[in-house]
Image (cartoon, rainbow, N blue to C red):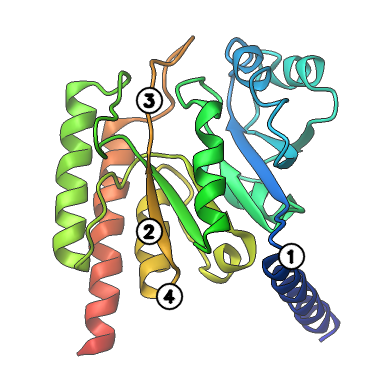
């Protein structure tokens, strides 16, 4: 009973802080960086984040790295917040980071250096316009990906097209991993995803729950070092499964 009351008080306090932020036009933004063995990439990434004044805190969510990822992060950015995720996968890391974040909004950025911190103000600008969720897209206007292999591009195109048909949406890039969202509204979505199906579940649930959503153009560059933790067999299947499960759950409610 005490836990329920404490949680209720916490949500009421957070909701009040959210309203105050909207009135003042000032938002606290936490930057969440899920990482697994990204020691070689972090200096390149973190050195470009430190001068972005809108960022309240940077949270590195470590997935059990054995290459010195945490030591490198602390050397480059001594005030970075380090937490260990309680499971595996990007989805799990994001949820762990969200629970630890102090910001009114949090943004997710990959640790591999393929996503440009210089684009962060684009996302923050949309938040200031009143959007609850802002998602990056590599296929808007003349923006592109230099990191997409042919099979990844095909998987993303098919997944996004099928999702738009089933969900009656018009998303342009379902699988791109950079987004910023109101923390309270994210927690209310009760995201189940633990791996790279995170974005698919997030977007459909955000749409279903009436969150205001905007897309901003993103230029993805090649990963600096190492190999991606995304696997086509596991993550491709999870993304497709999420698209159909979320559609089926909504279909059952209506019928």
Residue 209 circle label: 4
The residue tagged 3 is 220
Q: Earlier in the sequence, mark 4 or mark 2?
A: 2
Viewer-side label of 3, 4: 3
Q: Circle 3 sits in a helix, a strand or a loop, which is it?
A: loop
- In front of the other: 172 or 204: 172
Quadrant of image for the N terminus: bottom right
Pointer 1: residues within 10 angstroms few (<14), some, or many (20+)? few
Tell me residue 31's x, y (percent): 65, 40
- In front of the other: 245 or 126: 126
Q: Earlier in the sequence, mark 1 or mark 2?
A: 1
The answer to whether residue 18 is seen in the rendering is yes
Tell me residue 164's x, y (percent): 19, 59
Tell me residue 199's x, y (percent): 40, 50
Q: Quadrant of residue 47?
A: top right
Q: Quadrant of residue 220?
A: top left
How far apart are the two marked residues, 4 and 2, measured between alpha carbons? 10 Å
Vertical order, 54 against 100 (above or below): above
How far apart are the two marked residues, 3 and 4, measured between alpha carbons? 29 Å
Q: In screen coordinates, is 59 left or right of 173? A: right
Quadrant of image for the C terminus: bottom left
The residue tagged 2 is 203
Vertical order, 33 against 206 (above or below): above
Q: Circle 2 sits in a helix, a strand or a loop, which is it?
A: helix
Q: In screen coordinates, is 106 left or right of 4? A: left
Q: Circle 4 sits in a helix, a strand or a loop, which is it?
A: loop
The residue tagged 1 is 24
How far apart are the two marked residues, 1 and 2, measured between alpha carbons? 28 Å
Q: Earlier in the sequence, mark 2 or mark 3?
A: 2
Viewer-side label of 1, 2: 1
């Amino acid at each position: 009973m005490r836990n329920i009351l404490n949680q209720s008080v916490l949500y009421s306090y957070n909701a009040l802080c959210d309203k105050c932020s909207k009135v003042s036009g000032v938002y606290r933004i936490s930057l969440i960086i899920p990482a697994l063995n990204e020691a070689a990439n972090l200096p390149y990434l973190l050195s470009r984040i430190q001068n972005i004044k809108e960022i309240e805190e940077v949270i590195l969510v470590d997935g059990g790295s054995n290459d010195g990822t945490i030591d490198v992060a602390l050397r480059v950015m001594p005030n970075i917040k380090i937490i260990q995720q309680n499971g595996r996968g990007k989805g799990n890391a994001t949820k762990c980071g969200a629970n630890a974040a102090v910001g009114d909004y949090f943004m997710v950025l990959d640790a591999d250096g393929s996503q440009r911190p210089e684009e962060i103000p684009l996302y923050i600008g949309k938040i200031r316009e009143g959007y609850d969720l802002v998602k990056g897209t590599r296929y808007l206007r003349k923006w592109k990906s230099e990191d997409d292999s042919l099979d990844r591009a095909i998987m993303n195109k098919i997944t996004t097209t099928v999702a738009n048909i089933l969900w009656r949406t018009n998303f342009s890039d379902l699988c791109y991993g950079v987004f910023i969202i109101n923390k309270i509204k994210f927690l209310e979505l009760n995201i189940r995803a633990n791996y790279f199906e995170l974005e698919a579940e997030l977007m459909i649930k955000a749409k279903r729950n009436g969150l205001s959503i905007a897309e901003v153009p993103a230029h993805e560059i090649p990963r600096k070092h190492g190999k991606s933790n995304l696997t086509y067999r596991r993550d491709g299947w999870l993304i497709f499964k999420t698209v159909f499960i979320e559609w089926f759950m909504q279909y059952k409610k209506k019928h």
